[in-house]
Image (cartoon, helix red, strand yellow):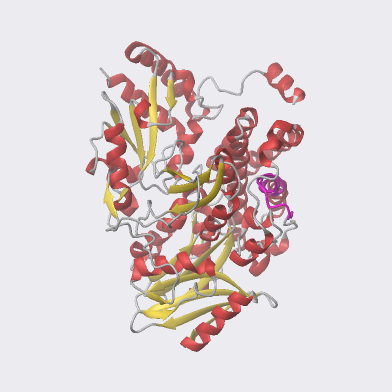
Amino acid sequence: MTWSLSTVDTKHWQEASERLQGGTLTLLGLWGEPGRAHMALLERATAEFGLLTLACPDNRFPSVGKLHPPAIRLERAMRDLYGLEALGLPDTRPWLDHHEPYRFLPVEGESLHQIPVGPVHAGIIEPGHFRFTASGETVVRLEQRLGYVHKGTEALLAGAPLERAATLAGRVSGDSTVAFALAFAQAVESALGVEIPPRAAWLRALMAELERLANHFGDIGAVCNDASFTILHAQLGYLREQVLRSAERCFGHRLMMDRVIPGGVRSDMAAGGEETLRALLALVRRQFPDLVEVYDNTESLKDRTVSTGIVAPALVEQFAAGGYVGRASGRSFDARRTPGYAPYERLRFEVPTVQAGDVNARVWIRIREVEQSLALVEQVLAALPSGPVSVQAPDGAGEGIALVEGFRGDVLAWVRLAAGRVERCHLRDPSWFHWPLLEAAIEGNIVADFPLCNKSFNCSYSGHDL
Amino acid sequence: MRKLLFRNFVHGPLTEPAPAADEAAAAELAARLEHAARQRLGRTLSIREVDAGSCNGCELEIHALNNVVYDLERFGLRFVASPRHADVLLVTGPVTQNMRMALERTYAATPGPKWVVAVGDCARNGGVFAESPAVVGGVSRVVPVDLHIPGCPPSPLALLRGLLALVETVK
């Protein structure tokens, strides 16, 4: 599947915004660089992928967010990072730039009170601020303020040699390090026309599925823990630990950081890796079904997760929410299928979807995805081709873009290379389109259910704040 | 549910006597940690974790300290929800400009005597993000640091070893 890259004028840009509003196009990303704006799109009817680039000589461009709300935070970030003004943008408050005191949206009404939470939270989690407006126990509005972990990653990427850029890409969001490194590598390979050896592609898939398993075990357990049902948290935490240990034995790092590089993978799987992974599969297959049964048969737990934090299917479509947030509300998009990449066209797997859109649905999607990932790891082990695991990426120039499926959803990477260095790079975390839906999900729920809703989304702060 | 409880009853706890990564060293470490914590702190040390800009990799491994395999609480070390309840701040990440004030305030809210442990390569000197203008740098640029635990991210075993070093030097 190839992307069509085109430079457009303002008229064409606006037409695309209108088609986003109409729902015939899907927004996959919107970002800037000095003097230019870029928009990644999916044509819904034909499943064609396109990148539009608009020259903005005076650093202005017509706002997409004016017509299509999912673009609003992206355009606020473009202004903070590159001084690009989106003309007509309905919300012009800074987003990643925290120099000025933040103006929260005004709230009017009888018997309302506000609860400010963060940026330092009570648990071992990333920083962000949540401003709840509540009427008694019920949340009438949540407003998020993010950007606390903004590290200037895109500015560091500009001008970086490929190896350093790959290291940075792997640290956009630590829990998705394989997915980001993979997206970056694929974008570079597309820009330079590099063909990687088959074994490299299969090892990448193996790592990506292990990452998915580890995160899903952690998330399912964490949701149960926030409903004070600690036994599942403990049991699933044990399974997560076994995945990480297997990853270390096979690839030399528990989170598999810096293993995927442009041109392939850094090193082959360690000797005995196949046996390690087969033992892991056997362990999970023995224990996981019992844990699922406990989840399904514990009414006090289901009482907390069923019908809590519902996201409407229409919102999920509008925001093009990927991963479990999308699939729990009926959106079946999966980057492993569309645009698709090696070796997934040779593997059998299902993309589970349900319609309910509540916390319970997001837990069940993860349960089903664990089952799919186990089957995928098994298939990869059975058909792993032999041969080299990397090729040298040449010092070339070019532009490339890639979409890969992380555990949270689709990760977008775009690069422009010159003389073996990154000239510009953008990495878009799935959380950009999940965070606004969390605001919608909590509305009308009680304050005490927010941790459950939040865990069921498990958005990345670092991935979003860049 | 009953099946699961029965299985756990029969098989015993999943908690390992010591982390398996380096069994001899870890067993020794666990014993020393337990002894030192009891001696110096009356078997209690409360830790408040602060992410001051990390990529969340360090948070994942700090979380792992609480899983049944490492079970940090058996050593009397536990994570608390507020800096006001904490003896130790465990700080991760290159400190971002946007988190600087929050970190300073968290430190100020922690009652003395208090210790700061900087976790991970970024917390030491900014790591791979050191050159960014959006980043202040290592944790010691903002609050005094008593101990650095290196790694990207440090493994649970490395974290355990680091916390031991802290406990042993606490007077």
Return the residue found at the far front: A110
Task: Give the x, y percent position of residue B78.
Answer: 44, 25
Q: Can the viewer see residue B141?
A: yes
Q: Quadrant of the N terminus of chain A?
A: bottom right
Residue range corresponding to the magenta coloring: A353-369
Looking at the image, residue A3 sits to the left or right of residue B171; the answer is: right
Task: Give the x, y percent position of residue B79.
Answer: 44, 28
Residue at 50% in and 88% down: A11
Q: Can the viewer see residue A270?
A: no
Residue at 70% in and 52% down: A376
Task: Give the x, y percent position of residue B163.
Answer: 37, 27
Looking at the image, residue B90 sits to the left or right of residue B75; the answer is: left
Q: What secondary structure predominates along the stretch shown in magenta?
A: helix
Dividing the picture into quadrants, the one containing residue B108 is top left
Looking at the image, residue A2 sits to the left or right of residue B134; the answer is: right
Q: Is residue B38 above or below residue B101?
A: above
